[in-house]
Amino acid sequence: MRKQSFNITTIQEQRASSTATNTVQESSSPRIEATVAGQFLRKLFQFLFYLHFILIAVLTIFLAIRGVVLSGKHHFQPKKWYPPLLASAASAGILSLAWQWMTQSKPSKAMRICFWLGPLMTCAFGILLLLINSAASLSTGAVAIISGVIQSIYTCWVNPRFEYAGKILSVSAAFPPARTAILVTLSIILSAVYSSFLVSGIGGATAIGTTLDILFIVVILLSLAWSMHVIKNVLLVTISRVKYIHFAYGADMETEIAFRDTIKYLMGSVYIGSVFVPIFGSIWGSARTINAIAGERDEFLFSCADCYSAVASTLAAHGNRWGFVHVGVYNKGFIQASVDTWEMFKRAGMETLINSDLTGAFCFFSGVAGGAVSALVGGTWALAVHKRYATEVSIYAFLIGYFMFRTATAWPLACVSAYYVAYAENPLHPRFDSTIPARIQELQRYQNEQIASPDPAQLWEQYQAPE
């Protein structure tokens, strides 16, 4: 077989030449050549990531060595600070591996479990912080408990969507690409090792505890977030490309080749998306929350919420996780890929369906549950051996566990993303069943019923209004 290049057309030609019974048609969308501005942006973010990685590595090593040398002068006890945090990282790794197996074997059950386990574990994490009984732990614990209650309310609100969410997850992730488990396992191990490395720097900064050291800790945590998102999105691009080829053309691409192409050609777009998607996604989510709270009765609040929502929608259209599919398949720049996929969803009448999709929430709740369990492991240990370290150890453990579980759930997110994008490009393809069309019709009926049903508050106001 000839050497496979990045171009999707070559993949199709190879598939046609190697298997006569499963011929792939010519792609209507060949590889997209990046513009000069797009190439510059990719190279810029690639340079920034490598530069930041080197600087963070140097900073972490410096802080770790300085912390060991000067720990005695500042009454820092590394034997009571490091073991709980490292144990929580190890437990997060093991549990995330178990969770990705659970998601693969019983996706519908995993979907329902995580939406109830997330709030429960968050409240347990908050109770642990309250038991620590320091100023920082009390405030953080209160926030955690309130967050758990909000998650519970959200779970009750989206409960009617669980059936469809479990079905679309089961259909799209029914046949994971070859060696998916190996790739996810290696990514989780890499995440655990890198997190443990950064923990050494955080411990070194904690040993001294100056204002500058606090700034160093914040910088290291930001680096942890960006790096973990990069690891997750490499999986997302790689697996979504393989699944897209399967859904759209019936071909089976080798996961190793997709991974190699991602590392070789697409890392610039991955770095960009790893910054934009969390920020734009948070803004878009907050806008939807504000819209729900503001309603349409207060004209001033509604106008402000509407303006903010318009800005958030524009940002989300230029930076969303669906764009990673086109990044992998067509080598598009991340922003262009996001715009194209969002416009494609609109043309296919899928915008409401995409907005109500629970796959992203499933990954988020999985991360919250995993982070809370990791925090309970590290925080309980620290509380038992040295209470003063318990709050910070719990928070760091939560962040590490959260990001590792998000890495473990990247592959089902990639499968669902590829399924939606492939369907939007060709809804009439015989490989797709009635799952999406039936759901779109159901959402349209619900919207029509909402329009036809008058608002009781408006009827009451009309009744009370003088003639």
Image (cartoon, grey):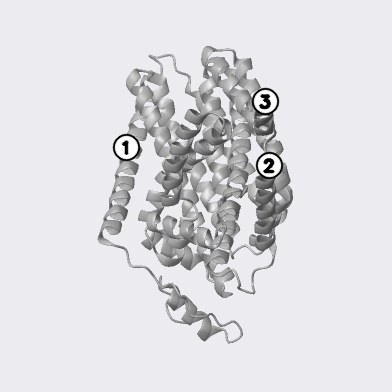
| In-front residue for pair 95/316 | 316
| In-front residue for pair 418/262 | 418
Count every numbered label the image shows and give the total: 3
Examine the rendered structure and indicate whether residue 326 appears above or below residue 23. above
Q: CA distance from mark 1 to mark 3?
A: 71 Å
The numbered mark at residue 58 is 1
| Residue depth check, mark 1 versus mark 3: number of the one nearer the observer | 3
Is residue 91 in view from this perspective?
A: no
Is residue 59 in view from this perspective?
A: yes
> At 59% from the left edge and 12% from the top edge, which residue is drawn?
133
Dividing the picture into quarters, in which one does residue 280 lie?
top left
x and y percent of residue 359 in the render? 61, 49
Could you tell which of marks 2 and 1 lies nearer the N-terminus?
A: 1
Dividing the picture into quarters, in which one does residue 29 lie?
bottom left
Mark 2 surroundings within 10 Å by alpha-carbon count, few (fewer than 14), some (14 through 19), many (20 or more): few
x and y percent of residue 216 in the render? 36, 28
Examine the rendered structure and indicate whether residue 35 appears above or below residue 19. above
Is residue 319 found left or right of 171 in the rendered image? left
Dividing the picture into quarters, in which one does residue 58 lie?
top left
Say which residue label 3 marks.
Answer: 464
Is residue 336 found left or right of 299 in the rendered image? left
x and y percent of residue 176 in the render? 62, 62
Q: Give amino acid for label 3.
A: Gln
> At 43% from the left edge and 44% from the top edge, which residue is drawn?
227
SS under mark 3: helix
Q: Give amino acid for label 2.
A: Val
